[in-house]
Amino acid sequence: MFNRREFMTAGALAGAALAASSTGCRRTSYGFLNDHQASALEAICDQIIPADDFPSASQAGVLNYIDLQLMGHYRRHQKTYRDGLRQANELSRNRFGVELAAASPQQQFQIVSAIEKDNEPFFDLVRAHTMQGYYGTPRHGGNRDAVSWRMLGLDEPPLRGRAQYDLTAETKR
Amino acid sequence: MKHVNAVVVGAGAGGGIVAKELATAGLSVVLLERGKWYTARDCRKDDLRNQRTTVLGNAFGPDDGGQPRVTVGADGTVRTVLPSEGIYNNDAACVGGGTLSYGAQAWRYMPQDFRMRSTYGAPEGSSLEDWPITYDDLEPFYDKAEYEIGISGDYSGTPFKGPRKRDLPMPPLPPNREFSILEPAAKRLGLHPFHLPMARNSVPYNGRGPCMRCRWCCGFACEVDAKNGSQNTVIPVALATGNCELRTECMAAWILTEDRGHARGVTYIDADGKWQEQSSDIVVVSACAIESARLLLNSKSRLFPNGLGNRYDQLGRHLQGHHYTGAIGYFDFDTYDDVGPGASIAVTDYNHGTPGLCGGGMLANEFIRLPIHMVDRVPKDTAHWGLGHKQAMRAWHRRSIIIMGPTQQIPTATARVTLDPAVRDKWGLPVARIQGNVHPHTFEIGDIQSKRAEAWLKEAGAIHTNLTGGHPTLVSAGQHQAGTCRMGDDPRVSVVNKFCQLHDVDNVFVIDGSVHVTNGGFNPALTIMAVAYYASDALVRNWKGTKFRS
């Protein structure tokens, strides 16, 4: 077992390594998604979690998360993604004459709303996976630099040990 | 392979205790566990892969490879489901079972919980029944469990509890912010709030330190080993006697019987995939309600063509768990203090005594929320996605409290485990098929519990509330699963006698949640443990076999 100091040091090193690997460059190619699929998925994910003062889904690494899982635990969902993304692009071409990625944010919103209604199984999967990639642990390739946790005001890395907490005020209440 | 006195199948809450009690009494024991032995170092704090949020798999088993189950929906839809899907009704598969990663609420049931039929009468269509034993029979063993496993908490705030000889061995953890908000509100409502009991060290106990109050608790192994399960209490004691051998990654296939109808051992598949036979004087089945029923159903022979203990078609019936309902309150001030385990305050005022309701359940605040838990818990008028959802996450994650509780289910004989006729696991064994539902009165009780939770939150200052619960169409029997090997005096309507011994085969015992006749309005772990101490005590007292042979 590590003692406390070693543990903190190891944690800091691991954190630094993670930061280096995840902020250095954005992946331009994925393992499962081709570029065409990736750009459509990026549009959908960024409608589900858009950017404001804090990053959007894709900025936080959600595509990276989904792509990794589609080659791993979510291998069984590959077909749903392939078909769903193709249909999303078709829908965008039919309505607006352009691929989903090239549509305006307002048009993308309309397409995603249509998918939510007409292709519920696909939408539900993408929504769930987007939320997982954004709000889940960074260890699976999403939530880059724990950005969503910080957005929610959670310490990252967390404070460890009960001595960190001033519980006396609440005990005396 | 050397003959032993007892084979215990399953190293969870029940089996760990049985192994320890038999081994310390001098019996030779082989403890079979299909999962691995994890430790504090396997905590991993993985929000997406633990025993509670399983979207990327179960951290402590079973994994998704080759261990499916089959469910039959209310409309007859048959589905093959993976262990990481909620509908699988999983409990962990590892040394410690669910107790490695549970939230560790450690409740005694109330005296009425053992006398449900006598107290309320059985609603039509239900199989509500009394236990053949009472709270008083179990009290010494609840006490033993509380001291040997190690429980913290303080029952002194409530009059709604069974009599107890002494206090819990450890004081409660200092209150978190939710406790401080909810306690005065409950008192204003005339309720009796108190520090709920937890199998968690609040002070050093049993050679291990106290809880460090982190964010990753329910569903995770404890990083500082302050959470008490069978894996860090009774199982090490069992092994230290020298009389108990733990064999991990060993899957029991069936119980062997001889021509006179006695069990003679267990056939299992070891970690290398080899089929093995372990002969023994007695067999103890402690595999958790669904897998215990499956093992007995799979133990077919000429004398027992429908499985062991299934002479009257009772095996696998009365499957139950808990119907969780409650409410989420949203506040205009911070409620979140990032101090685990989170769950801290409970009331038991609503467990019994409401006219027109067959019982009720305990209500408590929920374990500390990870961000992923909040995604589907934003206020009900919030957008499902988009900027509105993101803003709601920011607005409410630190400003919400969940109160909920395990509504006691009213069981039915048609909620059951059988063997699926087609689907087999990776070892070629028929898998469990789950079907049926609890009695609809359960949902009437649950809906009222939700309203009660909401009223408590409003009294505490909630400005909005959501009710949670719903009416599931399939029996919900996951980590709290119980009832498939009902305990009773009459062999025609039960599977084991009041000492957890099969009516049909006197050297086979079922000692886990399976024997629960009803499952109380509480988390069941401590009751499983108390029953394990009680049944082991009877077993050892009646043991006429040979002593440990080296």
Image (tube, grey):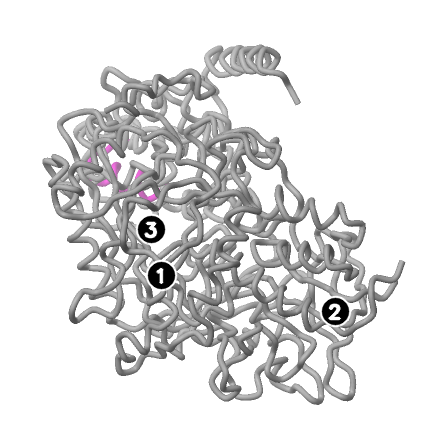
Quadrant (top left/top right/bottom left/bottom right) for the C terminus of chain B: bottom right
Residue at the disc numbered 2: B266
Q: Can residue B55 be seen by looking at this rendering?
A: no
In percent of width and height, residue B117 lies at 32, 77
Placement of the N terminus of chain B among the 4 image quadrants: bottom right
Residue at 29%, 32% in the rendered image: A100
- Mark 3 and mark 2: Cα distance apart in space: 44 Å
Q: Given this view, does label 2 or label 1 mark the residue nearer the observer?
A: 1
Q: Which residues are magenta?
A: A85-99
Check if residue A96 falls in the magenta segment. Answer: yes
Circle 3 sits on which residue?
A121
Residue B251 painted magenta:
no
Query: Would you identify the image quadrant in which residue B135 lies?
Result: bottom left
Task: Give the structural element (helix, strand or loop) at label 1.
Answer: loop
Taking depth in this image into account, of B426 and B305 the one nearest to the observer is B305
Marker count (numbered): 3
Tell me if residue B523 comes above or below residue B485 in the rendering: above
Q: What's the residue type where badge 3 is placed?
A: Pro
Q: Which mark is residue B110?
A: 1
Front position among marks 3 and 2:
2
Q: Does A125 sit above or below residue B74?
A: above
Q: Chain of mark 1?
A: B
Q: Secondary structure at mark 2?
A: strand
* CA–CA distance in space, label 3 to label 1: 44 Å
